[in-house]
Image (tube, grey):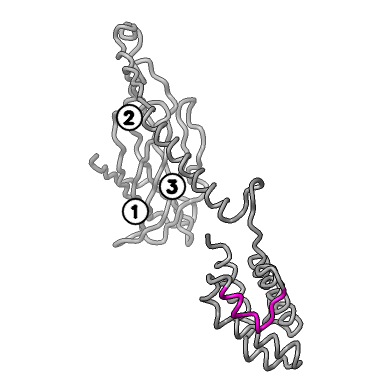
Amino acid sequence: MPALAISIALSIPMPGLAQETGEATVESRLPRTVGYFVGDRLDYAGTITVPDGFDIDLASRPRPRDLDYWLELQRVSIEPARKGSGRRFEVMLGYQTFYVPLEPRELRIPPVTIGFRRQEDGARIEATLPGFSFISSPLRPILERSSPQAMRPDAALVVGDTRPAQWRTGIAVGASLALFGMLAAYRGWLPTGRRRPRPLGLAARHIAGLRPQTSRDAYRAALLELHRGLDAAAGRRLLADDLANLLREHPRFAEAAADLGRFFAASRLLYFSDDPAGAAAALPARDIVLLAGLLAAIERAP
């Protein structure tokens, strides 16, 4: 929409004050004039240029309000933007129409006048953004064009075949349940059936909770927990000299043979020689946790 340029010199002389105020130039950018329906918004922009020294008169600033039963001024923005000579103000007015026409109808938005005042002498000028007209259209034809025959037919109902999706969902759910059942059986979560005791797994959880690296008492308790787990797994009390028999009867513990040897050496230093420092050097607290986890993993393996 081409811009409109309007020069306005509406100076109001005041007694004892200067009357030379210059001109206010208005450049308006109108919205489109057609294609509006009930509830649509119209944004009306403009630029007002006033001489230097003038500023907006706040009393004349438009405020959002109902302008008519069908028109509402919702947004008002007036921002200074100095470019070139004089002072420039960018004005944005946001309207919304609530008119429900029975047929296309031309509606008019009234002009907006904004005042500017010079602080030095009180001189005042006004600038008017011109009104404009637009066409509001009905949402659908009425009167003689509103018969059922004139309306577009309903879209054909399309029923999608959901059976493939149902099959895919059923297969996915079944596979998930089967995998969960296998995991539950492996971890021993099932409430029924024979459950293989896992004393080393229980010992590993207790040792992790003891945190043997925090104190000597926790270190001593962790060694004792691992002793009890090994005794329960072997079905008898184990000593360092029994390690070879344990590995022969349970070959799966062979990968932990070296660490088990260090464990029994640390246990002998702690319990029989009362040498906590030597025990910690033979098997540091962190290695107790790692050894317990390794033995628990071996115990879980099928």
Type of amino acid under label 3:
Ile
Type of amino acid under label 1:
Thr
Q: Is residue 260 shown left or right of residue 179?
A: right
Task: Say which residue label 2 marks.
Answer: 133
Mark 3 surroundings within 10 Å by alpha-carbon count, few (fewer than 14), some (14 through 19), many (20 or more): some
Q: Residue at x 70, y 88 (%)?
A: 268
Task: Say which residue label 1 marks.
Answer: 49
In this picture, is 281 found above or below 248?
below
Please state which of the two labelled residues, at mark 1 or mark 3, is closer to the viewer.
Answer: 1
Q: Nearer the viewer, residue 118 or 187?
A: 187
For the residues bearing labels 2 and 3, Cβ distance under 8 angstroms: no
Q: Is residue 274 shown left or right of residue 26?
A: right
Please state which of the two labelled residues, at mark 1 or mark 2, is closer to the viewer.
Answer: 2
- Residue 18 position by quadrant: bottom left
> Residue 12's mark?
3
Q: Nearer the viewer, residue 162 or 234?
A: 234
Secondary structure of residue under mark 2: strand
Q: Residue at x 34, y 28 (%)?
A: 36
Secondary structure of residue under mark 1: strand
Bounds of the magenta segment: 237-248
- Residue 291 position by quadrant: bottom right
For the residues bearing labels 1 and 2, Cβ distance under 8 angstroms: no
Please state which of the two labelled residues, at mark 2 or mark 3, is closer to the viewer.
Answer: 2
**Between discs 2 and 3, the one toward the N terminus:** 3
Measured from the top left, where is residue 133 in percent x and y? 33, 29
